Amino acid sequence: MEVPDRSLPATTFEDLALPLFDQLYNFAHWLTQDKSEAEDLVQETYVKALRGFSSFQLGTNFRAWIFRILRNSFLSSRTGLKTTVEFDEEEHTAASSEADSSPEQLLLERADRDLVQQSLAALPVHHREILLLCDVEEMRYQEIAETLGIPIGTVMSRLSRARRALRRSLQEDLRGKSHGV
Amino acid sequence: MACERWREQLDAYVDGELPRPDADALYSHLRECAACAAEALERVQMKRSVAVAGLRYQPGVAFREKVRKSIASNQGTNRRWAWMILAVPALSVLVVSIVVYMAADRDKARRHRVYSELADLHVSALASASPVDVVSTDRHTVKPWFAGKIPFTFNLPELQGTDFTLVGGRVTYLEQTPGAQLIYQIRKHEISVFIFQDRADQTLTATSTPINALSFNAENWSQNGLRYYVMGDVSATDIQALSELLRSAK
């Protein structure tokens, strides 16, 4: 995914913000799980970002800045408030590697995009968002830390748990699928 | 588990966030450990699966256009405001400049009118058969003569040791205001000294710098609530010298 070259002195809000439109919408839709709410969230994000653009320091990370605005807007939205954003890092650590299936089993299902999407959607927001920022947006840990407002150490631990949770979710789906067939 | 410490680094490794020495060490281990290599491969595959599956939602064309227009119009508004922010001080400066210029212009016109009137008074007095109503070279005679004729009093300088001679004085009017006109002489040239009450609305902004008005040299200043005008067909130096004498009169 293309990341705007922040070394260039892009001057207008439009230059910086519009290239991120698709990414912001995708992220918003993943958070809200609803098209209409995603549109409202993106629109709200752009309005807030434009209004606060004067406080944004050119040369710093615009993508992290605007993603943070979107995420904070989501968390303060009705849906966001209803979403249990569970930050207990230990909550999902019980599942250890012995509970995981063999790598081969998951590799067989790698083409099952719907299944991965289903598992992603089922994850708690704080796991879903960090996976999207890291694997879809290809943000560096530092950028994720800025976006989520957490230390890099927390990014690493949360990411690890999110992946473990996704793997577990996929395994359960696979088991259900195989039992159902 | 012997490989635990390697497994802990796998996420950072597949994300490209592991520092080079650690990454090299882990890579060496993966070449020797089939279990860890399989685990690493799975994580890479998971990452790719999420990357593909995560690109799920596309904004509609209409929505994209709506936001784009919204930004453009808002930026337009901001630009208009930015223009206003820049323009308002500039306009203020312009307005102030115009006001100052107009005020200066008004002042200049008024000064011109006042000096014209004073020049008329000066010329008409000299052309008159009796230029002064009180003829005296003695300031102690001239000054009391004005008592009761004008609503103020003033001091006249001692001229001993100077080239100036007091000729006399008369009551005169400037802009319907009564005042004193004193006539001094220097090398057969007459100089008029006009003294009026200094009213705020009539105060001339001119400094005491000598000016040239209608071929006469003139100077004016304000002192003790009185406005002095010195005017004559003499040099500016003479005007200044007499003005200085008047300013220091006690």
Image (cartoon, coloured by chain):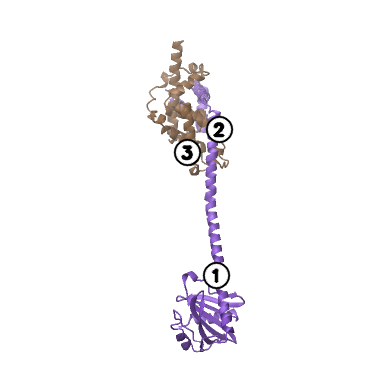
Chain colours: A brown, B purple
Which three-letter amino acid code belongs to the residue tagged 3?
Lys
Q: Chain of mark 3?
A: A
Query: Dot 1: few (<14), some (14–19), or many (≥20) neighbours within 10 Å?
Result: some
Nearer the camera: disc 1 or disc 2: 1
Element marked by disc 1: helix
Left/right placement of residue B36 relative to residue B185 reads left
Q: Please tell me which of labels 1 and 2 falls first in the chain.
A: 2
Q: Residue furthest right?
A: B215
Query: Dot 2: few (<14), some (14–19), or many (≥20) neighbours within 10 Å?
Result: few
Q: Is residue B240 visible?
A: yes
Which numbered tag is attached to residue A48?
A: 3
Q: Is residue B16 visible?
A: no
Nearer the camera: disc 1 or disc 3: 1
Find disc 2 in the rendering and name its residue.
B65
From the viewer's side, name the closer residue of A41 and A61: A41
Residue B121 point in image, percent of width and height: 56, 79
Q: Quadrant of the C terminus of chain B?
A: bottom left
Q: Chain of mark 1?
A: B
Q: Quadrant of the N terminus of chain B?
A: top left
| Rendered residue at 48%/21% (across/down) | A116
Q: Chain of mark 2?
A: B
Q: Is residue B135 above or below residue A95?
A: below
Which numbered tag is attached to residue B110?
A: 1
From the viewer's side, name the closer residue of B50 and B125: B125
